Amino acid sequence: MKGKKVPKECAFVFQNPELQFVTHSVYDEAAYSYRLKNLNEEIVERKVYELLERFNLRSFKQHHPYSLSVGQKRRLSVAASIVPKKEILLLDEPTFGQDAHHTFELIEMLQELQREGVTILMVTHDIRIIRHFATRIWTIEKGRLVQDVDVEAERSEAL
């Protein structure tokens, strides 16, 4: 791999969010990575409130992550994974359990991260996400790559 850089930081959002929760409150889950970096608690608080607001979880800050709905757990798992920003974000069905509003809100946030240079790999069966978000589509069947489509190249050719 001469000449290639291996990313220092990569985050993974599990298909089952409960498997990645490590604290006993929504607030502490969102604060966990900030605290690992030994940030001042006032800065942590400000950043966590912004994050919880962005993911529509602020009113649940004192709840245990396991007590949240499926969609809320998913949003919390994504929120906790993007703090601090990683070079690569791996997501397994991040929109499962979300209503249309939260699905597209989450996709917009992921697109913002993508514009900032974050590489996003997502497993999804949601054709709406594939149509609006994907730049490359890999189709996997029985553990094997059976199709590799460069969506951006196809879009350019269509113009």
Image (cartoon, grey):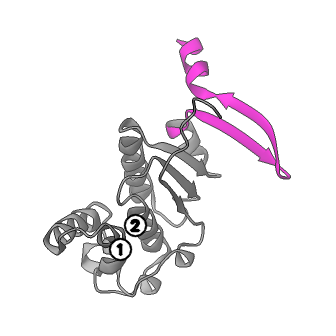
Q: Which of marks 2 and 1 is in front?
A: 1
Disc 2 to disc 1, C-alpha distance = 8 Å
Point out residue 93 in the picture as x, y percentages from the top left corner. 58, 59
Q: Mark 1 points at which residue?
A: 32
Left or right placement of residue 39 versus residue 158 in this view: left
- Residue at label 2? 80
- Residue 19 located left or right of residue 26: right
The amino acid beneath tag 1 is Tyr
Which residue occupies the foreground of this view, 50 or 151? 50
- Compared across the picture, whether 51 is left or right of 120 comes to left
Q: Which residue: 55% across, 33% down? A: 135
> Residue 23's x, y, as percent?
41, 84
Residue beneath the point at 48% across and 68% down: 74
Asked whether, in this view, residue 91 is left or right of residue 40, the answer is: right
Q: How many marks?
A: 2
Residue 146, placed above or below residue 40: above
Which kind of residue does numbered mark 2 sit on? Answer: Ala
Secondary structure under tag 2 reads: helix
Mark 2 touches mark 1? (CB < 8 Å): yes
* Badge 1 element: helix
What span is in magenta? 133-159
Q: Where is residue 10 in the image (x, y as percent from the top left)?
A: 51, 54
Q: In this view, does 149 lie above or below 141?
A: above
